[in-house]
Image (cartoon, helix red, strand yellow):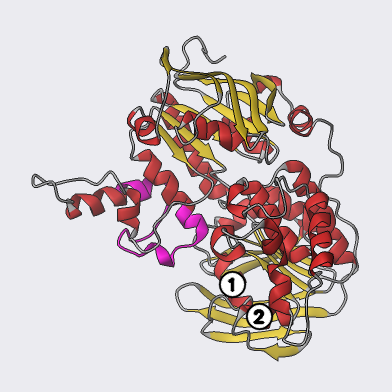
Amino acid sequence: MTDISYPFIEAKHITKIFSDTAVLIDVDFSVCPGEVHALCGENGAGKSTLIKILSGVYERDGGELILNGRSLDHISPKEALNLGIVCVHQELSIVRTLDVAHNLFLGNFPKNKFGLINRHALYHNAKIVLKQIGLDIDPKISCEKLSFAECQLLEIGRALNRNAKLLIFDEPTSALTPKESTVLFSLIKKLKSENVAVIYISHKITELLEISDRITILRDGKVAASTETASLSREELIAFMIGRPLDNFYHKMKVKPREVALSVRNLSKKGVFEDISFEIRRGETVGLFGAVGSGRSSIAESLFGLQKYDSGQIFINGREEEINDVKHAISLGLALVPDDRQINGLSMLMSVLNNIMLSRFASINGLEYLNLSREQDLAEQYIQNISIKTPALNTPVYRLSGGNQQKVVLSKWLMMHPEILILDEPTRGVDIETSAQFYETLSDLASKGAATLLISTDISELLGTCDRILVLLDKHIAYNFNVHDITRDTLIKAIKGED
């Protein structure tokens, strides 16, 4: 059992209010040196608000913060960093125009005797960190060329450089396969042995139970439960999070596939993916599984006109199409939920309503018009259907939690009833109950003839929702599995190239 006699940081009776809405109510939370304390709950439960208070981003409206036994009246982000409190946030803070090494040591550069950046030490140290996090890339490469998952690993690497006493991980494995997650868990175990305190936030139940010593569950801004992890079962944890047991999580209906909707032949992009060929029938959900750097997101973006491929063919309903831009893709009945919602999924300064309506704006031509009253009613319907927690339809989307932002992206495309749906980590940062609702919607779309390509690092999600699973290895499709013929171990071995 973890010794919790001397917490590194302790929050007592914390309250936080935004616009007359209480986001945190009388919350108690602590984490000890050498402990992994998991913080979980549904989207909007208050998790992100609590860690922002602990790291100095937000001021608390009530309660007390105690660090190493000393009460803190006020703490700024800079002071928190100086005290050893380091966050790996769910939303990336990578500067895309800088190279890998400069991002890894941003604000913490090795200096020479003249106070200038020691470039030799910078790139040498970057190679050491990249090896630590299992990322095989050139430290001099621009981050503009990296995938979301690679940037997520860089965020973790940057945090490791900070000599942290408390590391806060917010959804760190949301775009990582089990292969990369294993590397992260090994690093966390090493941090524990070095007496570093760790707060771990995730919606992935399996990893919460695997990695943590204690779990605190927030629900509607209050502590629903706080206990030793060993005393909780998976079912009990889910029930605490949503307030009731959850049955039939994946809602997979039996659907007989029909004619081919999407056919991809020999699609290639130099250095990114090679000779990609597959097809998806109406009513079929096909998974795409690959390690960081396998090209999985670039394939999705090439199909949707966000990236240019070098060679190959794309057929929609039997007709060859050269998809040059997003509007063309939408006109063909395609929709994409991208891996990086802030860059390709949302307009962060626009309202929730306008973001949900963006796909409708893109699909109309000059002779059509939108019935704004009807669109608002539709948006309200989707907000209710997948439980988007927002003060109002006109609230800027940047004010929502990461999980609620993802729900807005899902709503934007689901209300279009697309014929071909490309989903790249669609449930990243989304809570359990909403994920279940989304899987039900996905199954319903399949029953109505939609063809779906699901890119995911969550093996349980792939096995629970897909009919077939394609595995990327060395930038090409190495395996095409029928989901009924494989297990979790099959996919893990496949991604490692083991027969």
Q: Earlier in the sequence, mark 1 or mark 2?
A: 1
Q: Is residue 124 magenta?
A: no
State whether residue 41 is above or below residue 271: above
Residue 350 point in image, percent of width and height = 61, 60
Q: Quadrant of residue 62?
A: top right
Q: Kindly identify which residue carries mark 1.
A: 301
Indicate left or right for 119 with 228 as reference: left
Indicate left or right for 124 with 446 as reference: left
Res 499 seen here: no
Residue that sits furthest to the left in the current view: 114
Amino acid, disc 1: Glu
Residue 412 point in image, percent of width and height = 72, 63
Task: Name the foreground residue: 268 vs 303.
Answer: 303
Q: Which image quadrant: the C terminus? A: bottom right
Q: Which range of residues does the magenta coloring cover?
A: 128-151
State whether residue 143 is above or below residue 268: above
Q: Kindly identify which residue carries mark 2.
A: 327
